[in-house]
Image: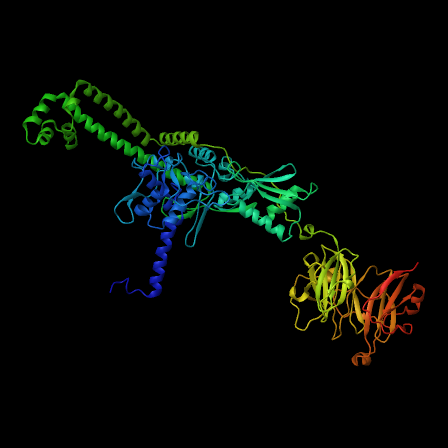
């Protein structure tokens, strides 16, 4: 049994997982800092170059390329390989596309809507040649492909820092990479300056590279300090914001953040409109086409709406403003993954480029020296032409004889034997001498360059400038100073229309428009009826009090219309078992209401103190087993009486100022209810209401009503906690739960 076969299962699993994770990190997910490509991208580009699909060639079916990629170099699924190829061709996904596509390669609205590979055609872009032009000049290392039948390059000989220009994103095992794309002009100028001044700081480099440059033209609103932090650590984020303009009173969004689709934005805005989270938009249209890849029209409800404030809300609540994560993680020249800052990644690439140029020059120098060696042999032949011809005609092994006679190498002898008869003319000798002189001069120049660091730097800068002249372009992403986006407060988005909240005896709630609605005339379910109502505004919350003295809050704008029969309160809250509801009250936060139990105790509370976001409610009235009455709004403490009517027909008016203002509790005694009578259910506090001073009180008993004028109400005014005086005969059994108030004339 081998050592590996005898591993315990834990050790084997650990070893296997480690090997897998290293494979994913090094051979799938992370780019190489030299050419900025992941293995699948590198293999696609190389396979296309082998097929002759240069930028000047005719387009060829994508299926042919994918077949070569997965059959020769990348033994994975054709779908994954094709999708990687499509991304390299999408101008809205890749800053400098490596592939030119013909056919449907997806759109900004839906990047994955590309056609099947049997329908599309492709070829390499002109920019891709910067990765390939030097590949055959001894600049790259080669390795066997997956089955050992072919060789493939370990990396490509990038003439530009593609790792920054196109960036990369990928998820490995235990690490990820998110390198943003950058502008070629910015990066090349910074690189040239870094060659001249290796001690440049990151802030100095940022004079040339102020920020990433994305394929879409959304604005970068990150601050310079945030960019400095990102470039200094290699980690951070870039905040992108869509661009818009006002046309004929309509908002036109014409540039979206990187990797944000039009359909997603439309869905996000439409969702807010449908859920009534925003009521300022009249219409929403998508007018995107080939000429305008992003064109979303937002039509405000009126010209009075602040369009900038509306857009600020949309920036805050949709992907019109998006953070793009940055993690500049790449495989370095040492073969290990590492997070680079801006200066290190440029210096690492310059090291790669310097080595590449050295290898290219050395490869050329070796070829030139080999050619000079052959030319020296050919000149010997021309100087001794007759003797060479005689040796070739008379000897069985002319090569050995030539090597012996003229002290030639085997290579030189073979070159002489390969000469055609027509090349023996005098002019050919002159061309050999001219070629020798030219190559000798070239060899001297190459040797000088290889032996001089300054000459090598000059050559690298010259080639960078050539590529800058050919491929340089303007920035897409402009950096702007912008205010922080702010979503509308929920109350700002809700109309402030007058509403009447109505609660039924069985706990069904609804809201009628206006303050003139008659709650008792509404339709109720069979066996149900009117219990309580409160006048309020649509932007306010309704407070419902249950029989345990707990208060619950429900937004009025979310309540069902009074055109129906409402919804059960219990469906929107988490009330405890056996809970029933005593009443509803609503108003401004500072509005006051009276909370009381049928035991005769109560207090005044601010409506804001009764509100809660907790669906389980909050303790408000400590009932001690008593039953709460419906909360009553109190307009003024200084100019109001609190009217209490007991079951035995007694009424007491006390000054509102005699009750304390509390946030919760039992309160003080309002009217005296005999404990024995209360326990025997012979007496209790039946009705409670706030009555403005100088007002009359109308009470109902069955179908009869009786109005007590304000001057007669003085007979019922007394100190808090008294029993009160009897109401007139015939009105000591008050059936209705409410009294109507009328001002004296």
- Tell how many labels: 0
Report whether 588 appears left or right of 197.
right
Residue 120 vertical position relative to residue 671 in the rendered view, above or below: above
Task: Give x and y (percent) for residue 526.
Answer: 72, 69
Report whether 410 appears left or right of 328.
left
Report whether 249 appears left or right of 86.
right
Query: Which quadrant is the N terminus positioned in?
Result: bottom left
User: Is residue 274 or residue 202 the one in the foreground?
Assistant: 274
Task: Give x and y (percent) for residue 220.
Answer: 55, 41
On the question of residue 43 being in view, the answer is no
Residue 733 occupies quadrant: bottom right
> What sort of colour scheme is used for the picture?
rainbow
Residue 348 vertical position relative to residue 581 in the rendered view, above or below: above
User: Is residue 407 or residue 169 the one in the foreground?
Assistant: 169
On the question of residue 17 being in view, the answer is yes
Task: Give x and y (percent) for residue 446.
Answer: 30, 29
Report whether 390 appears left or right of 191.
left
Query: Which quadrant is the C terminus positioned in?
Result: bottom right
Residue 615 occupies quadrant: bottom right
Taking the spot 77% from the left edge, 55% from the top edge, the residue there is 514
Task: Give x and y (percent) for residue 176.
Answer: 44, 50
Residue 341 vertical position relative to residue 174 in the rendered view, above or below: above
Taking the spot 6% from the left edge, 29% from the top edge, the residue there is 395
Most distant residue in the right direction: 711
């Amino acid at each position: 049994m081998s050592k590996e076969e005898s591993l315990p299962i834990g050790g084997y699993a650990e070893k296997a997982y480690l090997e897998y994770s290293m494979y994913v990190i090094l051979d799938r997910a992370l780019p190489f800092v030299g050419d900025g490509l992941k293995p699948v991208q590198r293999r696609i580009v190389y396979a296309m170059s082998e097929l002759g699909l240069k930028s000047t060639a005719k387009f060829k079916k994508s299926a042919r390329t994918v077949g070569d990629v997965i059959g020769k170099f990348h033994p994975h699924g054709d779908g994954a390989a094709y999708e990687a190829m499509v991304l390299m061709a999408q101008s809205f996904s890749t800053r400098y596309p490596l592939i030119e596509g013909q056919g449907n390669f997806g759109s900004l609205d839906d990047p994955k809507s590309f056609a099947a590979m049997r329908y599309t055609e492709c070829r390499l872009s002109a920019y891709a040649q910067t990765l390939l032009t030097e590949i055959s000049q001894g600049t790259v290392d080669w390795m066997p492909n997956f089955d050992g039948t072919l060789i493939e390059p370990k990396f490509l000989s990038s003439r530009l820092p593609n790792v920054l220009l196109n960036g990369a994103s990928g998820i490995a095992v235990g690490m990820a990479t998110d390198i943003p794309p950058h502008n070629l002009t910015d990066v090349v100028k910074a690189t040239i300056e870094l060659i001249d001044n290796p001690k440049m700081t990151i802030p100095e480099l940022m004079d040339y590279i102020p920020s990433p440059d994305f394929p879409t033209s959304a604005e970068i609103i990150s601050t310079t300090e945030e960019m400095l932090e990102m470039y200094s650590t290699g980690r951070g984020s870039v905040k992108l914001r869509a661009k818009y303009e006002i046309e004929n009173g309509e908002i036109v969004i014409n540039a979206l953040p990187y990797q944000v689709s039009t359909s997603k934005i439309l869905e996000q805005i439409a969702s807010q409109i449908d859920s009534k989270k925003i009521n300022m938009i009249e219409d929403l249209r998508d007018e995107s086409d080939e000429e305008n890849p992003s064109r979303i029209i937002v039509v405000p409800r009126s010209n009075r709406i602040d369009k900038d404030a509306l857009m600020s809300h949309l920036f805050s609540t949709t992907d019109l403003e998006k953070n793009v994560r940055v993690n500049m993680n790449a495989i370095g020249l040492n073969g290990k993954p590492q997070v680079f800052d801006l200066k290190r990644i440029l210096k690492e690439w310059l090291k790669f480029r310097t080595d590449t140029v050295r290898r290219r020059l050395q490869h050329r120098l070796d070829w030139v020296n080999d050619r000079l060696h052959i030319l020296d042999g050919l000149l010997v032949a021309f100087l001794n032409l007759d003797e060479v011809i005689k040796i070739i005609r008379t000897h069985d092994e002319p090569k050995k004889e030539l090597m012996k006679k003229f002290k030639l190498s085997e290579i030189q002898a073979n070159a002489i034997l390969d000469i055609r008869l027509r090349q023996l003319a005098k002019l050919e000798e002159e061309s050999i001498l001219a070629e020798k002189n030219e190559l000798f001069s070239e060899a001297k120049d190459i040797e000088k360059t290889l032996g001089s660091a300054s000459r090598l730097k000059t050559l690298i800068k010259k080639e960078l400038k050539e590529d800058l002249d050919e491929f340089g372009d303007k920035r897409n992403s402009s950096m702007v100073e912008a205010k922080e986006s702010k979503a509308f407060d929920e109350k700002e988005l809700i109309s402030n229309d007058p509403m009447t909240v109505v609660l039924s005896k069985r706990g069904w709630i609804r809201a009628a428009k206006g303050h003139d609605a008659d709650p008792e005339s509404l339709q109720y379910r069979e066996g149900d009826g009117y219990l309580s109502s409160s006048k309020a505004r649509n932007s306010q919350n309704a407070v419902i009090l249950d029989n345990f003295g707990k208060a619950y809050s429900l937004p009025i704008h979310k309540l069902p219309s009074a055109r129906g029969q409402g919804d059960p309160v219990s469906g929107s809250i988490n009330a405890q078992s056996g809970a029933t509801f005593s009443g509803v009250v609503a108003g401004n936060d500072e509005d006051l209401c009276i909370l009381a139990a049928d035991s005769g105790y109560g207090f005044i509370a601010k409506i804001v103190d009764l509100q809660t976001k907790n669906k389980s409610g909050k303790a408000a009235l400590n009932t001690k087993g008593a039953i709460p009455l419906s909360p009553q709004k109190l307009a003024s403490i200084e100019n109001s009486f609190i009217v209490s009517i007991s079951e035995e027909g007694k009424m007491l008016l006390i000054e509102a100022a005699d009750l304390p203002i509390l946030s919760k509790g039992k309160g003080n005694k309002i009217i005296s209810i005999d404990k024995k009578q209360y326990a025997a259910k012979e007496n209790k506090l039946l009705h409670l209401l706030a009555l403005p001073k100088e007002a009359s009180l109308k009470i109902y008993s069955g179908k009869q009503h009786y109005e007590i004028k304000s001057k007669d109400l003085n007979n019922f005014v007394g100190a808090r906690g008294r029993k009160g005086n009897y109401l007139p005969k015939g009105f000591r059994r008050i059936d209705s739960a409410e009294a109507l108030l009328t001002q004296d004339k």
